[in-house]
Amino acid sequence: MARLYESRKRILVTGGAGFVGSHLIDRLLEQGHEVLCVDNLFTGAKRNIEHLHNHSRLEFMRHDVCFPLYVEIDEIYNLACPASPVHYQHDPVQTTKTSVIGAINMLGLAKRVKAKIFQASTSEVYGDPSVHPQPESYWGNVNPIGIRSCYDEGKRCAETLFFDYHRQHKVEIKVARIFNTYGPRMHPADGRVVSNFIVQALKGDPITIYGEGKQTRSFCYVDDLVEGFLRLMDTGPDVTGPINIGNPVEFTMIELAQEVLSLTGSKSELVYLPLPQDDPTQRKPDISKAKQFLNNWEPNVPLREGLKHTIDYFRNVR
Ligand code: NAD
Ligand code: UDP
Ligand code: UDP
């Protein structure tokens, strides 16, 4: 018993009622840790952690990370931030505040209690990339004043803060650059391409392709992503990142639509709508660093298989 308690950590997950955060909490609880889930429920929902209701090692706190938080914990996963363009553009000022002020508060907390802190950064720091695939050494091509900037620049500034707290205050940091991720518990109305296409296909509504549908993305199944998070948190203090975590298999949006149609058996037609401003034309992670530092980590779940699980989820939540 003593050994169990020695290895049990008190772990704070901000944004824990969201899509990715709720899967991370499942894994942390399975490993025997105590979890404090902090979320303001802006895009997340208690429904995502409802199956853990009354779990003795999970505590939920409704709180906005833009305000200070005084708790005693051993590790922090900082995921709080709306992730879909529709949501982060709904209140762009709040989006930047969440990334920047949220990072300052969580880093201040990590500094005070000497906790290791993980940051959910994003492939959006590369903007509309002119280098393909994107290695971590690429500095990006980001519009500082466009409609995506609140998210992109907020996350870039958060990375700056993480590295300055590391250099200046010796805080142990782990920065992951996450590429497009999908799976059960995505919000059906969050406007991201995978959830949109599945919901449209299941309803028999037209599949909305933005632009010509030739833009590419690389989709990672959520279980593979979370495995990468845990391995990054487990690395020694010299491994700070940033490290790309994503699936390097690239698809066009047309190809994605065809997969969804074939798996759902839907007869939905494809409709073409205007491409949103600053929409990146291509995106694919170079995951050599992840393989090198995260014990040969690479995604295991092919798109088709991950889509099947996600479609099953959406069939039941509608
Ligand atoms: P999500 O919107 O489902 O989850 C974000 C969670 O953060 C929600 O529960 C929301 O209520 C909460 N939140 C937002 N603002 C908050 C605030 N001010 N205080 C407290 N809680 C707040 O999104 P997700 O897909 O689960 O993304 C999780 C993290 O991963 C985000 O930081 C996102 O930027 C990052 N990320 C996700 C992807 C992806 O494809 N899913 C890609 C790159 C990066
Ligand atoms: N902070 C927090 N919880 C803590 C410690 C700090 O929320 O346990 C917040 C605090 O409100 C501060 C921020 O983190 O605004 C940054 O803390 P830091 O100690 O780096 O800066 P300072 O307090 O000196 O401004
Ligand atoms: N997209 C689309 N139809 C939709 C939603 C999105 O064609 O209904 C496109 C979008 O323009 C982008 C890609 O799919 O090129 C991925 O969009 P998403 O919002 O999922 O993620 P991000 O743009 O942040 O990578």
Image (cartoon, rainbow, N blue to C red):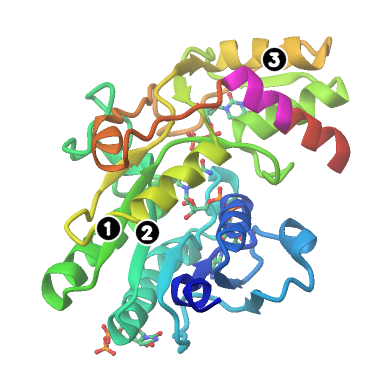
Residue 318, placed above or below residue 58 = above
The majority secondary structure of the magenta stretch comes to helix
Mark number displayed over residue 271: 3
**Quadrant of the rendered image containing residue 46:** bottom right
Q: Earlier in the sequence, mark 3 or mark 1?
A: 1
Residue 184 belongs to the span the image colors magenta: no
User: The N terminus is located in which quarter?
Assistant: bottom right
Span shown in magenta: 303-309
Residue 308 belongs to the span the image colors magenta: yes
- Look at label 2 and name its amino acid: Gln
Q: Which of the two discs, 1 and 2, sits closer to the camera?
A: 2
**Quadrant of the rendered image containing residue 72:** bottom left
How far is mark 3 from mark 2, CA to CA?
37 Å
- Look at label 1 and name its amino acid: Glu
Q: Would residue 46 be found to the left or right of residue 62 on screen?
A: right
Quarter containing ligand 1? bottom right
Q: Would residue 273 be found to the left or right of residue 132 on screen?
A: right
Q: Earlier in the sequence, mark 3 or mark 2?
A: 2
Q: Residues within 10 Å of mark 3 (few under 14, many from 20)?
A: few
Mark number displayed over residue 159: 1
* Residue found at x 43% / y 37%: 179
Q: Determine which residue is flagged by label 2.
A: 119
Q: Say if mark 1 contacts mark 2, CB within 8 Å.
A: yes
